[in-house]
Amino acid sequence: MQRTLLKSKLHRVRVTASELEYEGSCAIDENLLDAADIREYERIEIYNVNNGERFATYAIRGQRGSGMISVNGAAARKAAVGDILIIASYATYNEIELASFEPTLVYVGENNRIKRVGAQIPAQAA
């Protein structure tokens, strides 16, 4: 049996640009791509915390160290500069791979700088 699970996510990144006339995709700071193990042209799912929009596109490299999250093309209608996003990638795993499976969860702070990378969702304060 094969199962599709969360491979990685960028949690609560902030949109820095929204370019309607660009060809498409989402440009992401290369440091963030590396940390989340997302390859250029890989399909990503985007969840907009501000307006509830959920959509798919593909990742492209943004300038390393820039903090860039640029939603482009038609997707630019679904996210505005300043919106908070969760960007997720998924992969299909077989039962043997699942024995050692751990997602890569990347948490950012101000200016989309990496604060923490882990495999566990932090416990919620009660």
Image (spheres, rainbow, N blue to C red):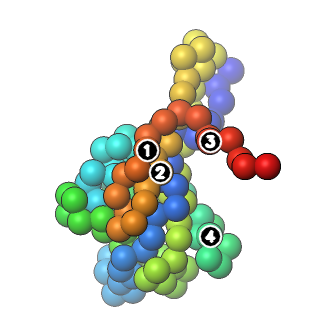
Estimate how packed mark 1 is, as few (under 14), some (14 to 19) or many (20 or more) residues with alpha carbons within 10 Å.
Answer: few
Closer to the camera in the image, 123 or 1: 123
Residue 31: image location, x then y, percent: 27, 51
Residue position marked by numbered label 1 in the rendering: 116
- For mark 1, give the secondary structure: strand
- Sequence-first tag of 1 and 4: 4
* Amino acid type, label 2: Tyr
Q: For mark 4, does the 10 Å Cα neighbourhood hold few (<14), some (14 to 19), or many (20 or more) residues?
A: some
Q: If you read the primary sequence from the N terminus, does the residue marked by circle 1 or circle 2 appear first? A: 2
Percent across and percent down for residue 4 are: 62, 36
Q: Earlier in the sequence, mark 4 or mark 2?
A: 4
Give the Cα distance between marks 1 and 2. Answer: 5 Å
The residue pinned by badge 3 equals 122
Amino acid at pointer 4 = Val
The disc, 3 or 4, on the residue closer to the chain's N-terminal end is 4
Q: Label 2: state its secondary structure.
A: strand
Q: Pointer 1 and pointer 2: residues touching (CB < 8 Å)? A: yes
In the image, is residue 85 above or below residue 78? above
Element type where label 4 sits in the image? loop
Q: Indicate which disc, 3 or 2, sits on the residue closer to the N terminus.
A: 2
Q: How far is disc 1 from disc 4 in space, using C-alphas?
A: 20 Å
- For label 2, the residue is 107
Outermost residue to the right: 126
Q: Earlier in the sequence, mark 1 or mark 3?
A: 1
| Residue 59 seen from this side | yes
In the depicted structure, whether residue 114 falls above or below residue 97: below
User: For the residue marked with disc 1, what is the amino acid?
Assistant: Arg
